[in-house]
Image (cartoon, rainbow, N blue to C red):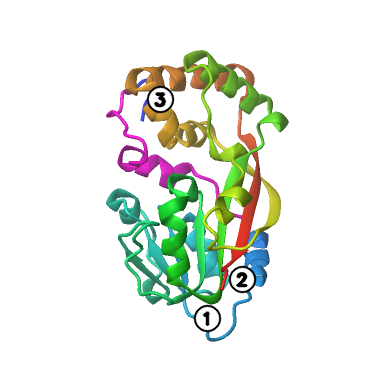
Amino acid sequence: MSPSEVTPPTQPGDFSPQAAAYARARPPYPAAMVARLVERAKLDACAGPVVEIGAGTGLFTKVLVEAGLEVLAVEPNAAMRERAPSWGERVQWSAGTFDDPGLAPASASWVVAAQALHWAEASTALPALHRLLRPGGHLSALWNIRDTERSPLLLATAARIEALTPGFDEGYRARDWPAFLTSTGHFEAPVVDEVPHVLTLDHARFLDLWRSHNKLNAALGPEAMAGLLTELEALLAADFPGPVEVPYRCRAWTAATVP
């Protein structure tokens, strides 16, 4: 896709126009993080499948499967589900949301949400997730957060975004997730884990990384977004030849259910 190609308008939260770029470009999750979270969730042989809500194109699903787990992957967007790989019987996909996962009460020991819980409303999502979990179950919410201050390329990109949409805020990066998770009284105070990692990208994948950004596409609109991608292509060619490194911090909050 040419950087200057204009894509359809984006509605906040509807990743249909971004699904292809999302599958191509978004970063994986560190296996070390999954290992930590499995310990936090205190899974045993009777735990059954992990429930992943907001599973997208299966990026976190992949590392769960690689850790030997079975997954019930819940994703409301058909375009995202269609781009997920097939893991056979290890993963079962269904349509659903945080408010209505479409699964039986008390059927899960561990619910995970990767790069997704910021779309939920605490007042409706947390009671629904508590109903879904068995007594003593756990909820883990995690995000790959770009470590902008460590990257001249990300700083330059952020400056261009700020010029186009002043005050643009990605919200969840600075959100008080312990307050969110405990706000309804359904979950205990969470424990926090963080694993840094670096993604090496060619120029096309770096541009796709921004194409996949739903909130940015919605804020800019198709023409301004195409203009940003053209600017970034020129920036890469002039100042960042060859593969580029994008640093991330994978950060997770895990909370046990309140009895």
Which mark, residue 47?
Answer: 1
20 and 216: which one is in front? 216
Q: Residues within 10 Å of mark 2 (few under 14, many from 20)?
A: many
Q: Position of residue 67 (x, y in %)?
A: 58, 70
Question: Left of 196 or right of it: where is 22?
Answer: left
Q: Position of residue 207 (x, y in %)?
A: 48, 31
- Within the magenta stretch, is there residue 26? yes
| Circles 1 and 2: CB atoms closer than 8 Å | yes
Amino acid type, callout 2: Ala
Of marks 2 and 3, which one's residue comes earlier in the chain? 2
244 and 128: which one is in front? 128
- Residue at image point 43% right, 70% down: 132
- Residue at image point 47% right, 18% down: 165
Please provide the residue range marked out in magenta: 5-29
Question: Left of 14 or right of it: where is 200?
Answer: right
Q: Residues within 10 Å of mark 3 (few under 14, many from 20)?
A: some
Q: Residues within 10 Å of mark 1 (few under 14, many from 20)?
A: some
Amino acid type, callout 1: Ala
Query: Quarter of the image holding residue 191?
Result: bottom right
Q: How many marks?
A: 3
Which mark, residue 219?
Answer: 3
Which mark, residue 41?
Answer: 2
